[in-house]
Every structure is written in C-alpha cells, then in structure tokens.
Image (spheres, helix red, strand yellow):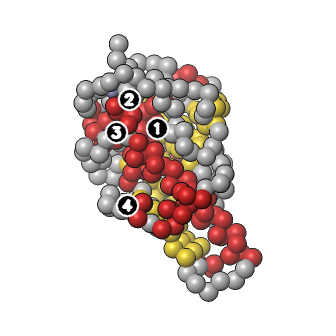
Amino acid sequence: MNKCWAKTISPCSSISKEHYISKCLLTDSVTIKGFDWCIDGYKEIGINSLTAHCLCKTHNEMLSNLDAAAYDMWLILKEYNRVINVRKKIRCDCYTSFKIDASLFERWCFKTFCNMLSMNKEWVPDENLVGMIFGKQQFPEKCGISLLFNIGDKAGLSEHIKIQEIKHEKLGPVGFIMEFKGLKLFGSWVMREDLIGYVPKQFNEDGKNKNVLFHFRKMEYPEIKINLLFDWSGKYDNTKNKIIKYLRNNNNI
Ligand SMILES: [Zn+2]
C-alpha cells in the first residue's frame, strides 16, 4: 500500500527513507508531544536513528528546497545570535541587517508536521494542505505560521526542535506549536477564527500569555544596531544573499 502522504498531488515512486526532520539541520534530537504515539508527555527522538517511510522518493525530492530553506533559517538565527553577543562586548557604529525567506520555511514547518503526524498511523493530510506544502496553492488568509513571544525572548540560543500537535475535539489535527532554534511558532491551515480561545491554553507552559504575531516581519535589537528581516513575498532567493552563502560554505558545527 502506498503510504506517501503526498499521493494526492501527483504520481508516486518508491518510498524513501526520509528523516522525519530534515537531516541537514544542526540538531541531533527532536522533542515531540501530543501525537497519538506520545500522548503522555514530551518524547525525545534521535534525528539520525529514525527513518520515516512517509514520502516517496519523487515527492521527497520535490520538497528538497524546503529543507534547504530550513537549514538557512537555522544558520541565520545562529549567526544573528552570535553577532548580538559580539556587539554586546564591542561597540559598533554600523547597522547590520539580515534577511531570510520565510515563505519556504513556513512550508517546511507544515511538511515536517505532516511527517510527524503520519508516523505510526494511517493519516493523510487533506488535498488542500498538500497543495499548500507543494506551493501549488496559497494558504487561506491568516493561515500559516505566527510567532509566539514574550518581550525579551531570545532567538537562536536553543539547539533544539520541539513539535507539539494541536488537536481540535471536532476537527481533529488543526495545527502545531513548533520551537525552532528559539523561535516559538504556531502553525495552522484552518481559518484562525475557529481556533480563537482554543490554542493559547495549550502553549503557556511558562504560565505567561504569549503575544501572537502572524507572518512576523522583523526581530530587532536596536541598542546594538542589528535586525533580522523575514520576507514573506515568496520571491526572495536565499541563494543570492551573500551572508547566507557565506554561512552555508563556512558552517563548521
Ligand atoms: Zn509520493
């Protein structure tokens, strides 16, 4: 039986041994919660010890640009944090601005969520969600990822990825909370009005209310003249960004 969750979009080939989370990311484990097979609490899985069997080779390859976008995001968050630490010690009068494509990264978040959800059970995302992940159709208005934050949160410090499924009593899976190198994200492909009042209770682990910023555009540290811009146009090309190019070529982690 064909277990590829993208089979509705185009013909499949044989199932690949894809890692649940893209192998190129610089973390060796992922913490997950809320999925049927780890309902009791957080569970840590090793990134290299598992293979997914949830996408065929063809569909896996079609999404390789999403993996690259997640890798770039990882690198730029790390660099952003590194420069902040340097600037705190050494005064600098120039302004440094980083820019990154957020649209492909958003699709990667949903792809990763589908991989996790189709693990150990016969679950397939609906055709629309598959279309959004493959870039064949737009996310509905106000659907996609939002940043959850408290003032003063620091991105880039954590070397971890954490994913938690959000399940609605009637609708089933409707979204996820993902922590990605210090960014705390909420993602949903269901109209957000359906979720108002439903989601926040689930992610206030620290007991604080989070601000929710849909398609966040900027993180900034004005005192030390640095910012990171997130481009949602779908047209920004990370490969033309000199800083990202440099980071890709000189990543020595
Ligand atoms: Zn397939």
Q: On the image, numbered disc 2 is attached to which residue?
A: 57
Tell me the crowding category of disc 3: few under 14, some 14 to 19, or many 20 or more residues within 10 angstroms, Cα based.
Answer: few
**Residue drawn 46% across and 36% down?**
113
Q: What kind of residue is marked 3?
A: Met
Residue 46 placement (x, y as % from top left): 64, 32
**Residue drawn 25% across and 45% down?**
137
Gap in angstroms between the C-alphas marked 1 and 2:
16 Å
Lower position in the chain sequence, tag 3 or tag 2: 2
Q: Residue furthest right?
A: 89
Mark 3 CB in 8 Å range of ligand 1?
no
Q: Is residue 26 left or right of residue 236?
A: right
Tag 3 secondary structure: helix
Lower position in the chain sequence, tag 3 or tag 1: 3
**Residue drawn 40% across and 64% down?**
240
- Res. 13 image quadrant: top left
Q: Which marked residue is nearer to the observer: mark 3 or mark 1?
A: 3
Lower position in the chain sequence, tag 3 or tag 4: 3
Q: On the image, numbered disc 3 is attached to which residue?
A: 62
Gap in angstroms between the C-alphas marked 4 and 1:
21 Å
Judged from the image, the quadrant occupied by ligand 1 is: top left
Q: Is residue 31 left or right of residue 143?
A: right
Q: What kind of residue is marked 2?
A: Lys
Q: Residue furthest bottom?
A: 93
Q: Which mark is residue 112?
A: 1
Mark 2 CB in 8 Å range of ligand 1?
yes
